[in-house]
Image (cartoon, grey):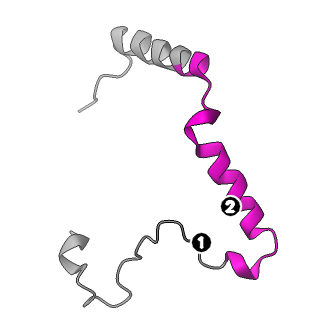
Amino acid sequence: MGERQSDGSAPGGRRRVHPGGTLSGTEDWPAGPVLEGLLAGAMCAGALDADAEQRAVAAFRAARDAGALRART
């Protein structure tokens, strides 16, 4: 719905992504860049726990097979 207004004509418009940039406002907060770095490090692929991921998938599949995830209409 908002995609139709992404030409910049809408007041306020959409925020644009700036890859490699920093979050707006972090320069005003001394711990901002540090926190941003910690969050980025936590989200990187190397920080994944493969065993935990396998346990989560197994739990999801068990719940799905038991019917716990059926849509309620």
Mark 2 surroundings: few (<14), some (14-19) or many (≥20) residues within 10 A = some
Amino acid type of the residue tagged 2 in the rendering: Glu
Q: Which range of residues does the magenta coloring cover?
A: 26-53
Name the residue furthest right.
30
The residue that disc 2 covers is 36
| Left or right of 8 in this view: 60 | right
Q: In which quarter of the image is residue 30?
A: bottom right
Give the mark, 2 or 1, whose residue is nearer the N terminus.
1
Quadrant of the snapshot with the C terminus: top left
Q: Where does residue 2 sit, x and y in percent of width and height? A: 25, 72
Q: Does the magenta stretch include residue 12?
A: no
Q: Where does residue 54 sit, x and y in percent of width and height? A: 52, 15
Q: Is residue 14 above or below residue 40?
A: below
Q: Where does residue 41 sit, x and y in percent of width and height? A: 66, 47
Mark 1 surroundings: few (<14), some (14-19) or many (≥20) residues within 10 A = few
The residue that disc 1 covers is 23
Q: Do the residues labelled 2 and 1 touch (CB within 8 Å)?
A: yes
Q: Does the magenta stretch include residue 35?
A: yes
Q: Where does residue 71 sit, x and y in percent of width and height? A: 28, 28
The residue at the point 58 percent across, 43 percent down is 44
48 vs 3, nearest the viewer: 48
The residue at the point 64 percent across, 34 percent down is 47
The residue at the point 28 percent across, 87 percent down is 8
Residue 38's disc is none
